[in-house]
Amino acid sequence: MRKTLSHFLEGCLIFCCLFLIKADPRAWKKLKSLGRRAWLANACLSITPSPSNETLFLNPKLQSVSGLTESVAYNANIQVKVQCFPLHMILLALNVTTVDVFSLDVEGNELGVLRTIPFDLITFKVLVIEYQFVEGGKKGLREFMERKGFIFYRTVVDQKASNHACAIDSIFIHPSVAAGLTKTESKMMGHEDIEQFVPLQRQRN
């Protein structure tokens, strides 16, 4: 099984809480059986400011590919109804107001999810966001995040992603994280299309 960013974080003692959200009923069934050391939710991240019931489009062959938009780009054409919640409601229910790392991959609705977040109430230190299907692409995502006060760190292209797909993520960091970067980490600032993800080795204060 391919190790993901969440697997890496699960093994790090500096992270006190890991939360995994899966809306696809097939992926959810598999996730529950793995015994992950994390909070789990069979739900969808909302692109509206309040909870709602939405249609999720699934790829008939790939459990890792689903989204709220029907798309020929990732062959999502099977429909199921799912319960969606804004991310901040889930986090506040757990009394979480600081997130060390947030990885977002929702097949094109990343900006919709981000627009629901009250960044004045919840602090995100590092965000890893897929931009492959985002409206406006990498440029549009970067402009939005910089308007919210985040700093673009680097882009990562993982050619070894599962199912022969290509994972394309932009990494953004909070100014407080940027201030504590090592010289080696600072040299990576602004780099584009770096293969494979190498997490920042940051200790909690």
Image (tube, helix red, strand yellow):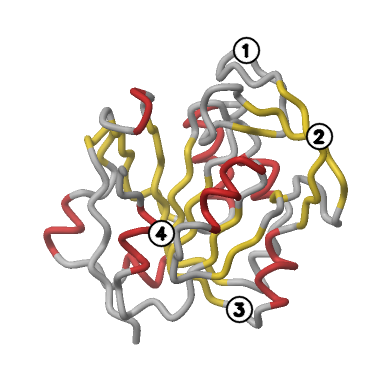
Q: Which label sits in the foreground, 2 or 3?
A: 2
Q: Earlier in the sequence, mark 4 or mark 1?
A: 1
Asked if the residue at tag 1 contacts the one at tag 3, i.e. Cβ–Cβ closer than 8 Å, the answer is no
Crowding at mark 4 (Cα within 10 Å: few <14, some 14-19, many 20+): many
Judging by the rendered image, the residue that carries numbered circle 4 is 173
| In the image: residue 3, left or right of residue 115 | left
Judging by the rendered image, the residue that carries numbered circle 2 is 55
Q: Amino acid at mark 4?
A: Ile
**Among the 4 quarters of the image, the one containing residue 85:** bottom right
Crowding at mark 1 (Cα within 10 Å: few <14, some 14-19, many 20+): few
Judging by the rendered image, the residue that carries numbered circle 3 is 96
Crowding at mark 2 (Cα within 10 Å: few <14, some 14-19, many 20+): some
Q: Earlier in the sequence, mark 2 or mark 3?
A: 2
Name the mark on residue 72. Answer: 1
Q: Measuring 48% from the left and 27% from the top, which residue is drawn there?
A: 132
Asked if the residue at tag 3 contacts the one at tag 4, i.e. Cβ–Cβ closer than 8 Å, the answer is no
Q: Which label sits in the foreground, 3 or 1?
A: 1
Under circle 4, the secondary element is strand
Q: Which label sits in the foreground, 2 or 4?
A: 2
Crowding at mark 3 (Cα within 10 Å: few <14, some 14-19, many 20+): some
Q: Earlier in the sequence, mark 2 or mark 4?
A: 2
Spatial CA distance of label 2 from label 3 is 28 Å
Vertical comparison of 25 with 37: above or below: above
Q: Amino acid at mark 2?
A: Thr
Spatial CA distance of label 3 from label 1 is 37 Å
| In the image: residue 89, left or right of residue 189 | right
Q: Measuring 45% from the left and 58% from the top, which residue is drawn there?
A: 34
